[in-house]
Image: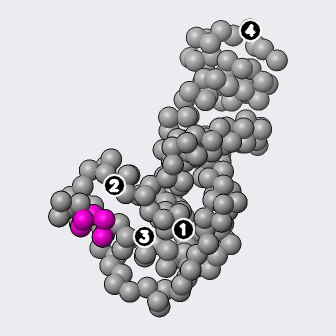
């Protein structure tokens, strides 16, 4: 189904009008929405999986889901926030399929945990930090992203990943220790 609007006309439309056109199957509107969101959602995908090629696949899967569920967006809250949840969930589904979220050991078994990573992170740049986050082991990276970047609580993370809250806390603590050690290594280079 094609609307009579040209690409340039679609580009200037309001967000809700663009969404409405996408729901109706307007390819030009879908392309505009893709172009608007892809550059913001790709970093979300890569933060979860740590691999550009896999992140590109997840981005595409996320857009398939987004376009198929677009009519369920009711305008409550920001559209970008609603879309972001789709891409996070798509990345989590991928990680579940790959068993990348197998978590281990309870918090009592984790040693040398330091929660003061903020001062160390101030000494490195944003790009270096993002590179370190994407290099985290999958379980650590997933919980770190969900808790620190996305703002989910340990209870929400536990429910979404089908793990215990203690496991979520453990993975976050270990992610912090891992990041601290990598930051110290960079400082010593």
Q: Is residue 137 above or below residue 82?
A: below
Which residue is the site of mark 2?
Answer: 129
- The quadrant of the rendering that contains the N terminus is top right
| Mark 3: few/some/many CA within 10 Å (<14, 14-19, 20+) | many
Q: Is residue 8 visible?
A: yes
Q: Is residue 7 above or below residue 159?
A: above
Q: Based on the displayed image, in which of its 4 quarters is residue 24 positioned?
A: top right
Asked whether, in this view, residue 46 is left or right of residue 162, the answer is left
Name, please, the residue furthest toward the left.
188
- Front-lying residue, 153 or 62: 62
Q: Earlier in the sequence, mark 1 or mark 2?
A: 2
Residue 35, given in percent of the width and then of the height, sits at 56, 27
Which secondary structure, mark 1? helix
Q: Is residue 102 above or below residue 135?
A: below
Q: Is residue 46 magenta?
A: no
Q: Earlier in the sequence, mark 2 or mark 3?
A: 2
The magenta region covers 180-185
């Amino acid at each position: 189904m094609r609307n009579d609007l040209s690409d340039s006309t679609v580009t200037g439309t309001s967000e809700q009008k663009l969404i409405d056109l996408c729901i109706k199957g307007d390819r030009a509107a879908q392309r505009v929405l893709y172009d608007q969101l892809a550059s913001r959602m790709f970093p979300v995908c890569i933060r979860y999986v740590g691999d550009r090629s896999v992140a590109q696949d997840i981005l595409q899967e996320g857009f398939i889901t987004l376009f198929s569920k677009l009519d369920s967006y009711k305008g409550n809250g920001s559209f970008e926030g609603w879309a972001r949840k789709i891409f996070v969930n798509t990345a989590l589904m991928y990680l579940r399929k790959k068993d990348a979220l197998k978590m281990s050991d309870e918090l009592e078994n984790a040693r040398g945990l330091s929660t003061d990573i903020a001062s160390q992170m101030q000494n490195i740049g944003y790009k270096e930090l993002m590179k370190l986050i994407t290099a985290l082991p999958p379980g650590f990276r997933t919980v770190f992203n969900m808790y620190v970047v996305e703002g989910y609580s340990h209870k929400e993370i536990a429910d979404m990943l089908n793990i215990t809250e203690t496991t979520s806390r453990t993975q976050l603590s270990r992610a912090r220790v891992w990041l601290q050690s990598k930051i110290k290594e960079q400082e010593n280079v």
